[in-house]
Image: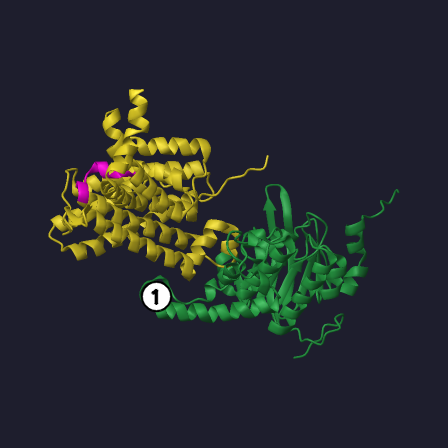
Chain colours: A yellow, B green
């Protein structure tokens, strides 16, 4: 009975006992969730446009952050380093299209997926070769401290990160919905044959999505790297974005955003309110538990396309 | 330069040779899909490619639009000879096409589908979109006007905002035609534009094809199985059988050609 009470009653009593603190937990969760969304967004972009599940998205986060920090350590001012890193990510997109995607056109999805695993190892090694394997500190001038808003503590850095992420999502939404390139991207995602017939070049579209995914990775890398240092474990946050993808659906941009927020908020609440009763550290596995539940009951995710196969 | 097509009742002028197929051969393994097929398509003409199933009609269209490269022979388009085209090259040159099984962007609306047809006409690039928002937006509006005229022309105003996946087949075919027209092609290739349609829809489609040809001067090469339709709308007919050209001429003459009749109905064997 004690256990049941601890799991089913006490946490809710705690929540009711201090609504203001609950709000603080939720806001903290939203701000972390936004960062999960950012990583998940990179996956979704590439998967939608080319049908490739890009295993290397996590390591692209690491690689971009490493490049940025590496350049800054060489004494390059931050804005110049940012521009240079963006150019590096664009060059990387060209290289990936030419050396990895183009030779594998029309191959099975699993082949392309395996190729991105290879890409993961390459980028990991290449990044460390160029910039070394030490933990690096990334200081972008936004202090990691909390301030008080009407009794609620909000972390300044996380708030800034969320703002940047929101801006990025807004820009991407306009790009996708309102422009020629966005329409071409959606066209390629929908039907390759038809896209070719109206004169859309598949290769240039692939370069664009990989470049955009690279820039999204850079933003995620700056945010996560600024918070916890630039190190190998940065590439592992990709693992955290897998549950986000399962929750939101692999093909949905809004899904990636909502999925990230749900996971972020969910794990914070679980940690703060349920953690003390079952020994803590819930934050580390809560997302995966949600993912398993979704795989059982709603495998296409919240917004993903339902795959109906004719037999 | 007014050479009137003899069989056609219309008085339109058929112009110079726009496209010339030079002895194109193409095999898939041991199957000779096309064997030394050669013909011409003249400016403003409606050319029908007919033949029994497996005659190589769609293969021919795929060669014309750059999907297949021929093993031998070449394509002369607007006076330039090429060994083969790439699909997006063909599109750039002004060759648009539709597909036998409708290749539309099923999740996009009718309007967006037709707008993709303008893709190559749009001049702004990635940077314009990122930096010069106004220019990109003005361009979008200008192209939208062209697209609206096409929508008007094909009478699909009511389905502008409907995702095409939800439309009935006949309408999807019409949207596909609209998308091809949006590219303002010089040469339009239609692969069975009337397949799977009822007679009313067929009549509509015939009318659109003739109107497009008449008003925009678009040259067309089409594959069609309905002989009534073919005889009615085409200026000239090319007949393929087992990958070879067996007849080429005005509809009346082709209809009476013994080789064509034999290909369609079979011939009596000498001993029968």
Q: Is residue B12 left or right of residue A213?
A: right
Q: Is residue A295 visible?
A: yes
Looking at the picture, tell me which residue is in the foreground, B91 or B138: B138
Secondary structure, mark 1, is: helix
Read off the magenta span: A227-238
- Which residue does the image show at 41% across and 67% down from the upper left? B123
> To which chain does the residue with label 1 belong?
B
Residue B181 position in % (x across, y down): 57, 65
Would residue A296 be found to the left or right of residue A311 on screen?
left
- In magenta segment, residue A51: no
Q: Mark 1 sits on what residue? A: B128
For the point 16% across and 47% down, the residue is A69
From the viewer's perspective, tell me whether residue A292 is left or right of residue B69: left
Seen in the picture, residue A214 relative to B175 is either above or below; the reply is above
| The image quarter in which residue B211 lies | bottom right
| Image location of residue B59, percent across then percent down | 61, 51
Q: Residue at x 19, y 40 (%)?
A: A129
Is A228 in the magenta? Answer: yes
- Say if residue B86 shows up in the picture: no
The rendered magenta stretch, by its main secondary structure, is classed as helix
Residue A284: give x, y in percent of width and height.
Answer: 27, 31
Front residue of this view, candidates B55 and A114: A114
Q: Nearer the viewer, residue A49 or A153?
A: A153
């Amino acid at each position: 009975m004690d256990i049941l009470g601890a799991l089913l009653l006490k946490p809710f009593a705690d929540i009711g006992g201090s609504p203001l603190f609950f709000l603080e937990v939720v806001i903290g969760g939203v701000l972390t969730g936004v960062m999960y969304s950012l990583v998940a967004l990179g996956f979704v972009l590439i998967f939608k446009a080319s049908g490739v599940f890009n295993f290397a998205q996590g390591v692209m986060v690491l690689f971009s952050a490493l490049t940025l920090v590496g350049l800054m350590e060489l004494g390059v001012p931050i804005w110049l380093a940012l521009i240079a890193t963006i150019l590096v990510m664009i060059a990387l997109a060209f290289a990936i299209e030419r050396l990895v995607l183009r030779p594998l056109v029309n191959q099975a999805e699993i082949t392309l997926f395996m190729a991105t695993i290879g890409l993961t190892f390459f980028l990991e090694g290449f990044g460390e070769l160029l910039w070394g394997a030490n933990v690096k500190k990334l200081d972008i001038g936004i202090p990691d401290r909390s301030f008080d808003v009407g009794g609620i503590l909000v972390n300044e850095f996380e708030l800034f990160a969320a703002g940047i992420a929101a801006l990025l999502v807004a820009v991407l939404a306009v790009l996708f919905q309102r422009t020629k390139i966005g329409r071409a991207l959606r066209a390629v995602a929908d039907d390759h044959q038809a896209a070719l017939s109206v004169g859309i070049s598949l290769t240039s579209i692939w370069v664009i999505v990989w470049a955009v995914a690279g820039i999204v990775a850079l933003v995620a890398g700056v945010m996560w790297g600024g918070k916890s240092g630039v190190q190998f474990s940065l590439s592992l946050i990709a693992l955290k974005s897998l549950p986000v993808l399962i929750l939101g659906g692999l093909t949905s941009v809004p899904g990636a955003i909502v999925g990230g927020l749900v996971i972020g908020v969910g794990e914070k609440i679980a940690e703060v309110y349920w953690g003390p009763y079952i020994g803590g550290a819930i934050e580390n596995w809560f997302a995966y538990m949600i993912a398993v539940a979704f795989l059982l009951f709603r495998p296409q995710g919240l917004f993903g396309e339902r795959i109906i196969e004719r037999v | 330069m007014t050479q009137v097509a003899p069989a056609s009742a219309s008085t339109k002028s058929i112009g110079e040779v726009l496209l010339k197929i030079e002895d194109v051969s193409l095999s898939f393994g041991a199957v000779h899909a096309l064997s030394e097929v050669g013909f011409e398509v003249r400016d403003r003409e409606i050319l029908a490619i007919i033949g029994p199933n497996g005659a190589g009609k769609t293969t021919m269209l795929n060669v014309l639009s750059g999907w297949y490269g021929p093993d031998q022979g070449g394509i002369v388009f607007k006076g330039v000879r090429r060994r083969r085209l790439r699909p997006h090259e063909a599109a750039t040159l002004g060759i648009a096409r539709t597909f036998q099984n409708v290749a539309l962007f099923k999740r996009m609306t009718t309007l967006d589908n037709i707008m993709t047809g303008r893709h190559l006409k749009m001049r702004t690039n990635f940077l314009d979109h990122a930096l010069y928002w106004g220019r990109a937006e003005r361009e979008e509006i200008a192209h939208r006007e062209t697209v609206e005229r096409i929508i008007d022309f094909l009478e699909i105003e009511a389905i502008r905002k409907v995702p095409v996946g939800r439309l009935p087949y006949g309408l999807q075919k019409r949207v596909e035609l609209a998308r091809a027209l949006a590219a303002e092609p010089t040469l339009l290739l239609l692969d069975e534009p009337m397949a799977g349609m009822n007679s009313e829809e067929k009549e509509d489609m015939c009318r659109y094809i003739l109107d497009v040809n008449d008003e925009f001067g678009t040259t067309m090469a089409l594959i069609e199985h309905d002989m009534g339709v073919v005889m009615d709308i085409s200026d000239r007919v090319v007949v393929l059988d087992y990958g070879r050209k067996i007849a080429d001429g005005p509809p009346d003459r082709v209809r009476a050609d013994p080789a064509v009749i034999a290909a369609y109905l079979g011939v009596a064997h000498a001993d029968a």
